[in-house]
Image (spheres, helix red, strand yellow):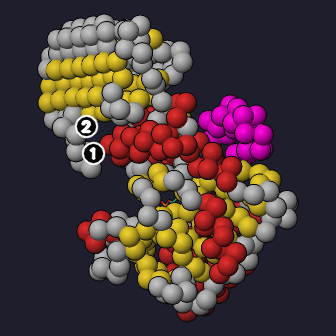
Amino acid sequence: VNVAVIMVGGPTKGTRFRPLSFNLAKPLFPLAGQPMVQHPILACKKIPSLAHIYLIGFYEEKEFALYVSAISNELKVPVRYLREDKPHGSAGGLYTFRDLLMEDNPVNIFVMNCDVCCSFPLSGMLAAHLKYKGIGTLLVKKVSAESASEFGELVADAETGELLHYAEKPETFVSEWINCGVYIFTPEIFLAIENVASQRNNDATLRRISSFEALQFTTKSAQTDFVRLDQDILTPLAGKKQLYTYETGDFWEQIKTPGMSLRCSSLYLAQYRLTAPELLAKGDGVKSATFVGDVYVHPSAKIHPTAKVGPNVSISASARIGPGVRLIECIILDGVEIKENALVLHSIVGWKSIVGRWARVQGGGNYMTRLGITILGEDVQVEDEVVITNCIVLPHKTLNMSVQDEIIL
Ligand code: GDD
């Protein structure tokens, strides 16, 4: 039997995702029409004898209750949300629920970060993991030297695949190979986490004996229940024939900002061509709108036949797209109305917002920069003929003048 865990984090981690994280937990934000967390959940279908999928985080239970019951029914595999009372770090979170995770007596525990976008090649990883016979196998990818420093950098043995050296977001360059945040562990990982925690406790006791400053001791000892998978576990275990790597050549991105969610939405839409072509909109060109490239449209959305949509557009439930509207590279959320002849380009339009006639909502298209796209929060109104370029607009604003390169609070 195997189990899977998806680390969903919590609200304090979502600050870079504002204003979209005001409304719902970041893991539930739709990418290519499906909640972010659903992409790793659906990838779990590739895991043989899967007993449970657990989401571990410190969001309130109610934020995930409806979602986990719906997806459990759909998948026919129980999906449960486990709430930490406070952040314990990625390894500490796992360790908190070790008894529960071990209830099914799993041979392997698949662990995935929720905020990565990739093809989750779990079958290939499992085959490699069984061959290596280590306590853990991590998914790795080669990226450019400039971008590697944002991630865990590592060195692996080219022949055996063994993880030889690991440094989390190092200041000086280590390697172009990075940790993708997808792992398979045997239950021995809990022992490794326990060892780190008890080592720290010993250190703390030693410090208490020798320390002059009691205050310093209290802050240090408080950290013993905060253990990170990367720097606290992978770094000390590297080079000990316990951890191995599995390389992916497929797409991989991290989703920390709204701009990256737009890019990742397009990667998942492109993946649908191979995995779920039925999710891509197909127009007949006469009675339906014109679709260009990869487009997702929720069945309850209404699109006027004279609208032109795509490439890379996802349109959520109950959205209404008027006559002559042009949508390119954008995410249109639930209940949005786009009125006639408006244009939306490189943008995310928040829940129940209204874009007026002949208005333009647009971004420059550089997803890596903060203002490279336009984001309208929930219930924003862009009046007729107004042009909004490279702006982040907080919820409930009415825009009656054109603006550029601004954060509208
Ligand atoms: N449950 C829970 N509790 N989840 C957590 C906690 C916690 O206390 N802290 C972080 N997470 C979750 C996050 O939501 C995310 O899915 C994952 O664990 C990793 O988050 P961070 O620890 O903040 O690390 P990171 O995202 O900056 O970088 C990690 O992932 C990269 C790949 O995306 C590192 O492991 C990097 O080495 C790696 O390249």
Q: Position of residue 234 (x, y in %)?
A: 55, 78
Which amino acid type corresponds to the residue marked 2 in the rendered image?
Ile
Residue under pointer 1: 367
Q: Position of residue 238 (x, y in %)?
A: 54, 85
Kindly identify which numbered label has been placed on residue 350.
Answer: none
User: Image quarter for residue 355?
Assistant: top left
Front residue of 226/367: it is 367
Distance from Cα at disc 2 to Cα at disc 1: 6 Å
Q: Earlier in the sequence, mark 2 or mark 1?
A: 1
Q: Residue at x 51, y 53 (%)?
A: 119
Q: Is residue 317 above or below residue 240?
A: above
Q: Position of residue 259 (x, y in %)?
A: 32, 43
Q: Could you tell me if the residues under marks 2 and 1 are in contact, i.e. CB atoms within 8 Å?
A: yes
SS state under label 1: loop
Q: Is residue 165 above or below residue 308?
A: below
Task: Let me know if residue 81 is in the magenta part.
Answer: yes
Mark yes or no: residue 220 visible: no
Task: Quarter of the image for the N terminus: give it.
Answer: bottom right
Residue under pointer 2: 373
Front residue of 225/63: it is 63
In the image, taking residue 400 as reference, residue 213 lies left or right, namely: right
Q: Which residues are magenta?
A: 59-86
Total count of labels: 2
Task: Quarter of the image for the C terminus: give it.
Answer: top left
Task: Let me know if residue 19 is in the magenta part.
Answer: no
User: Image quarter for residue 404?
Assistant: top left
User: Image quarter for residue 324?
Assistant: top left
